[in-house]
Image (spheres, grey):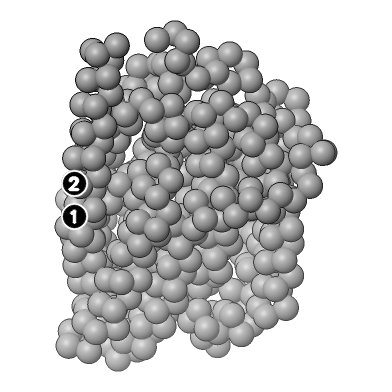
Amino acid sequence: MQQQRTLTMDGENPLGVRPIKGLLFSFSIPAIISCLVNSVYNIVDQIFIGQGIGYLGNAATTIAFPLMTIIMAFATLIGSGGSAYAALRLGEGRKREALLTLNNLLVIAIGLGILLAVAGLIFLKPILTLFGATETTMPYAIDYTSIVLIGVPFSMVSIALSSMARTDGHPRMSMYGILIGAALNTVLDPIYIFVLDWGVKGAAIATVTAQFVSTVVLCYYFLKKGRMRFTRRYMKPVGRVWYKIFSLGISSGITALVACIMQVVMNNSLVYYGNQTEITGDVALSAMGIVMKIAMILASVCIGFGIGAQPILGFNLGAKKYARVRHTYLLAVSIATASILIGWAVCQLAPHLVLSLFGKENQTFTDFAVRCLRIYLGGIFCAGFQIVSTNYFQATGQPLKASLLSMLRQLILLIPMLLILPLFFGLNGLLYAGPCADIGSAVIVALFILPEMRKLNRKIAESQGHALAA
């Protein structure tokens, strides 16, 4: 048995031998914190903007959010794909391939980040118009988004390297890199917005500064401390590595990209149907923007467990330790579901308390925001099962299934409901689309994961039979 254990560059990798429960928490908690911190970047801006500028400033960040989601989609794509591929190769003992993955990942992140930043700045006003900006909110949206775009290369690199740090066996390093940036953003926001009176520009400058610092911290780790390290000769583009990074990461990228499409449909629908009521489109847009940020926080816990489980799943599948694969998946699903149930209960029972963080507005705004929070997030308790299951297929080298399930909730179910239900129920139809999509997608995901668990059970039985025969 000792000879069968897979070795990494510095000896035995803990992914293949440590107890699953402790391993999952040690990887997931830093991942959860990292995901929460990534959400906090935008949410902290929204809290301070809401306190200092009001709902028009918050509407501007909601309008900019789809563009930030596109950037996140590409960063998540290459980060998750590189992490999954490196974990599988490390599990097989192919160390050089993992090093090629890390170094090629850096090249992709920098090049893609610069390309996206330039394209966004060139086409900024048409993009913001597409995302729901009105004459009232456009100046705020331009001030905020034009500055945030400058930091896109830093954001791409920090998110991608954060994923690789977990696969390298150092999930805390992933957390530290993001956490340092978030702490800096939280400190700088009130200084730039209130003290220097820079408004939404100040929030954007704080975000870019924080992203730069996170990038420096993570780059230093892979230059000086990591098991895998940056090496110039491994940065030469390798076609097969690029293909694996993009093919394995496509499901995560699709998830974020589809979220962008959903947000565009949502923003324009809120403006259109909101203007047909006494609520108005700008108020509806701002209120739903806050609810979407709260949903990000709740989902971050589930995403964190999915991300934390990913290198454990990939490594042990590569090492043919199928019982550890099954145990990891079931434990991650159970804990993620229990966690999000708590957040769901708070939103249903104390919505005013949650919304009070984002500033005080008029009664019309508050009443609609409470309604949004309770109805739109009514089915979010299913998210833990759906997110961890999708990550399972990605981590175990099944990109087609992972991609399909990534598109399921938002592209296949939610977007059609956002277009159809308001035709019959008006503005309320947009709210009821959320729980319908959440519950429906969970049912369909179950149809995919149950056969997978039966297949794992067969492999476990076969491996145990071979061990007894030996």
Q: Amino acid at mark 2?
A: Leu
Measured as percent of width and height from the top left, residue 168 is found at: 58, 29
Q: Is residue 213 above or below residue 407?
A: above
Please identify the quadrant where the C terminus is shown.
top left
Crowding near the residue tagged with mark 2, few <14, some 14–19, many ≥20 C-alpha atoms within 10 Å: few
Work out whether residue 414 or residue 371 is closer to the camera in this orientation and state it. 414
* Residue designated by label 1: 447
The alpha-carbon separation of the residues under discs 2 and 1 comes to: 6 Å
The reply to whether residue 368 is visible in this rendering is no
Work out whether residue 292 or residue 447 is closer to the camera in this orientation and state it. 447
Q: Residue at x 70, y 73 (%)?
A: 119
* Residue designated by label 2: 450
Q: Is residue 265 above or below residue 242?
A: below
Circles 2 and 1 in contact, beta carbons < 8 Å: yes
Farthest residue toward the front?
Answer: 469
Q: Is residue 122 above or below residue 88?
A: below
Label 2 sits on a secondary structure element that is helix
Measured as percent of width and height from the top left, residue 400 is found at: 39, 58
Measured as percent of width and height from the top left, residue 347 is found at: 24, 52
Q: Residue at x 46, y 16 (%)?
A: 5
The reply to whether residue 354 is visible in this rendering is yes
